[in-house]
Amino acid sequence: MATIGIHYVNAALQGAHRQGLNCRELLLAADIQPALLEEPDSRVHADQMTKLVQLIWQQMGDEFMGFVEPRCKNGTFALMADTVSHCHNLDGLLRKGIHFYNLFTDGITMSLQCRGELAEVHISFANPKLDSQHFYREFWLVIWHRFPSWYIGESIHLSAVELDYPAPEYEAELRHIFPCQLHFSRSACKLVFQRSYLDKPLIRSPLELEQFLTNSPADLMTIPGEDHSLSAQIQRMIVKDTNDGLLFPKIDVLARMLKISPQTLHRRLIADGTSYQQIKNHIRRDVAISKLVKEQCSVEEVSRIAGFSEPSSFTRAFKQWTGMSPRDYRSKD
């Protein structure tokens, strides 16, 4: 059900645009309507974003997507993944993977440092001006969090993430990607987590790794960060099996399910900068996009699943969420 803010679609195209690629054709080939780029609050399904990144890799022949110099030939990440597959634990994976890229390119410098009970993956980009919208820095951080998490079979709980630029307008989206302490305007980018993770064994088979690389970057986008926030708990409780339609319990029932009082629930949601109504709207939006794009459900069926009494009400809400009607959103014309 994962969806991604349109900012990341815009930002991902920056390197392709500099190289003279036809960005409109890239979007259409990824089943993304170009008009969505003009709607700052719109979102795309993770499958659409995956397809867009794959197309950029294919047409540019550059896994760095034009955001790091020199370019990185397609297949480099797969070679690194094969190299680290012979390691026994996460410590070996990170050290060997970091050594691999430090030998391969001067465009990105990485290191693994341990300080007391914490481990830190430091990442510096030689020319961050090539990545003015921060897309690749964030993507690289996602890779080096999600890939190791996948290999040990559990999401690495991040203690903090440091970024080498000021807090952006899309900070809320960034906090969804990295549900931990965020620190901006630092000298380098950094992932911080408990040192004990380094002893975790690698559990994936060669066949699983082959499938992971075939789907890449799909799993990197859908393996979640470990979000323990109240909002995330509520979403997980509601979004289980959506085929029979979303069911939203009343606020007092929800509070009992969470074993807190309605007053405490309301207060904690306010402290998180949200509300139960906002959470419901976000769930409806993401489920609707997923059903339209991934499962190709009819507008009428999506309207029912999302909990609308009639398709016209759903269409109005969908326009507020994305800036276009459900049919236009999915149209390939």
Image: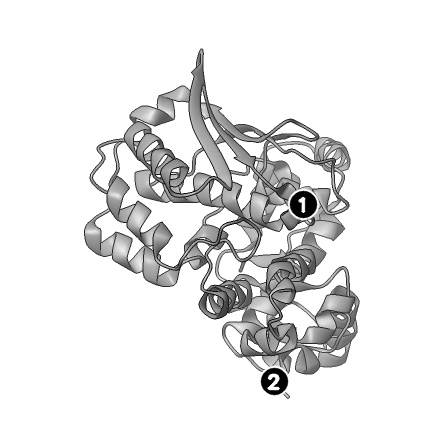
Quick check: 289 above or below 232? Answer: below
**Real-space Cα separation, disc 1 to disc 2, in angstroms:** 34 Å
- Out of 83 and 293, give the one closest to the viewer: 83
Which quarter shows the C terminus?
Answer: bottom right
Q: Taking 139 as reference, is 77 left or right?
A: left
Q: Which residue is mark 2?
A: 332
Q: Position of residue 77 (x, y in %)?
A: 37, 51
Quick check: 315 above or below 207? Answer: below
Quick check: 43 above or below 124? Answer: below
Residue drawn 37% across and 21% down? 196
Instruction: Verify CB contact (< 8 Å) between mark 1 and mark 2.
Output: no
- Residue 288 in which image quadrant: bottom right
Residue drawn 63% across and 72% down? 23
Mark identifier at residue 162: none
Q: Position of residue 101 (x, y in %)?
A: 39, 40
Quick check: 300 above or below 260? Answer: below
Q: Which residue is mark 1?
A: 129
Task: Tell me the amino acid under the disc marked 1.
Answer: Lys
Q: Taking 66 as reference, is 39 left or right?
A: right
Q: Residues within 10 Å of mark 2 (few under 14, many from 20)?
A: few
